[in-house]
């Protein structure tokens, strides 16, 4: 009788742990609840059918749910990240040099980051959006594809901004570094007068932090490059933006079919500018030093002042780091 009671208790405990693990697995989009093991390496070696199933697995020592990059391999964590941008938000165990396993902190360690204008070391990545490489648009933005080119755009038509927020998870930071790339549709208006930082003060991409919003950087989509402050210094620009902006136009002349997509000349990539002053300013990476220390999440907004048929800003890459 006592033996049956012990077996019953053990069965109940194991069942509860399995239910708990299964719930965790569902939360993390667990790929294979039928392959528990001592480690990612152990699961990989014992279950050949797991080799094409990167995802979250139940590790028996815990139990713990961890990410196992079964389908990836490289000479280092950095090598895997650079060649597989989709791993940018998936910290976990990866195969190094085919048969070695290592934990790669993909979500915090800034692999392959720029020196950010001479300020190197200690950068932490908070987002890496790359639609060209098959990535998805963050919440608040809408993914679209035109003529084989995919991008993120506002989630609604008409004047206004579509917002997405990138958590910094309580990190104290004083500097922000990043880059963005986009495209132009039609002829957006660049900076918009009569708007505050909370409104659609720009046709382009606004990057801010804190509440009330504090400005970090603005990517401006000019109707023409002659409408950019870098080309014509007398052009209007909001005082809170100052020099913390890049401005470019994808139009190569004054003629333009209403609503044309200008995919041949990506914006803010430091090349393809018509005006040399704008090209000199539009380096691929920006660097911004805050006035103090912040822990607030960073917000990015795609803003436009016109109907989609007239002119919109399209974003296909955005990478941000804090230090």
Image: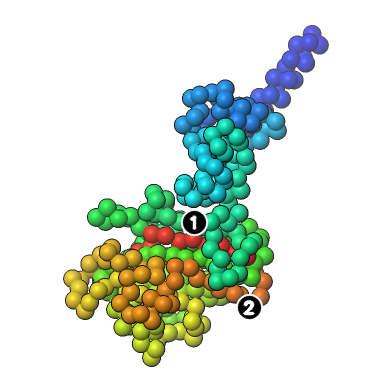
Residue 103: where, in percent of width, then height?
Answer: 63, 42
Front residue (pair 154, 38): 38
Query: Closer to the camera, 59 or 210?
Result: 59
Q: Is residue 193 visible?
A: no
Mark 1, Cα crowd under 10 Å, few <14 / some 14-19 / many 20+, is many
Estimate how packed mark 2 is, as few (under 14), some (14 to 19) or many (20 or more) residues with alpha carbons within 10 Å.
few
Residue at the (40%, 64%) spot, across then down? 181
Quadrant location, the C terminus: bottom right
Q: What residue sits right under mark 1 in the picture?
A: 128
Disc 1, SS:
strand
In the picture, measured across the screen, residue 202 lies left or right of residue 288, that is left
At horizontal 51% and vertical 45% (from top left) the residue drawn is: 80
First along the sequence among labels 2 and 1: 1
In percent of width and height, residue 172 lies at 67, 65
Residue at 70% across / 19% down in the picture? Answer: 11
Residue of label 2: 291
Q: Residue at x 66, y 24 (%)?
A: 15
Residue farthest along the right direction in this orientation: 2
């Amino acid at each position: 009788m006592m033996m049956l009671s012990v077996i019953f208790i053990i069965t109940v405990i194991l069942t509860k742990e399995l239910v708990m693990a299964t719930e965790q697995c569902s939360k993390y989009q667990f790929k294979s609840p039928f392959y528990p093991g001592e480690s990612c390496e152990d699961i990989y070696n014992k279950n050949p059918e797991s080799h094409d199933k990167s995802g979250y697995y139940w590790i028996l020592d815990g139990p713990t749910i961890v990410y196992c990059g079964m389908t990836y391999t490289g000479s280092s964590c950095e090598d895997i990240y650079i060649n597989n941008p989709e791993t940018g938000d998936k910290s976990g165990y990866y195969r190094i040099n085919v048969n070695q396993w290592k934990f790669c902190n993909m979500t915090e360690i800034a692999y392959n980051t720029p020196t950010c204008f001479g300020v190197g070391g200690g950068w932490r990545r908070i987002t890496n959006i790359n639609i060209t490489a098959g990535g998805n648009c963050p919440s608040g933005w809408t993914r679209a594809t035109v003529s084989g080119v995919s991008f993120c755009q506002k989630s609604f038509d008409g004047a206004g901004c579509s917002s997405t927020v990138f958590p910094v998870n309580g990190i104290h930071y004083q500097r922000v570094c990043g880059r963005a790339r986009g495209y132009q549709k039609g002829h957006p208006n660049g900076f918009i007068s009569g708007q505050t930082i909370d409104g659609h003060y720009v046709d382009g991409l606004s990057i801010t932090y804190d509440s009330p919003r504090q400005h970090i950087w603005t990517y401006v989509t000019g109707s023409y490059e002659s409408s950019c402050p870098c080309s014509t210094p007398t052009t209007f620009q909001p005082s809170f933006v100052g020099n913390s902006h890049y401005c470019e136009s994808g139009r190569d002349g004054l003629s333009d079919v209403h609503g044309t997509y200008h995919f041949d000349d990506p914006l803010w990539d430091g090349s393809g500018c018509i005006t040399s002053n704008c090209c000199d300013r539009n380096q691929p990476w920006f660097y911004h030093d805050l006035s103090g220390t912040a822990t607030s999440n960073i917000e990015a907004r795609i803003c436009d002042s016109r109907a989609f048929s007239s002119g919109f800003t399209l974003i296909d890459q955005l990478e941000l780091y804090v230090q």
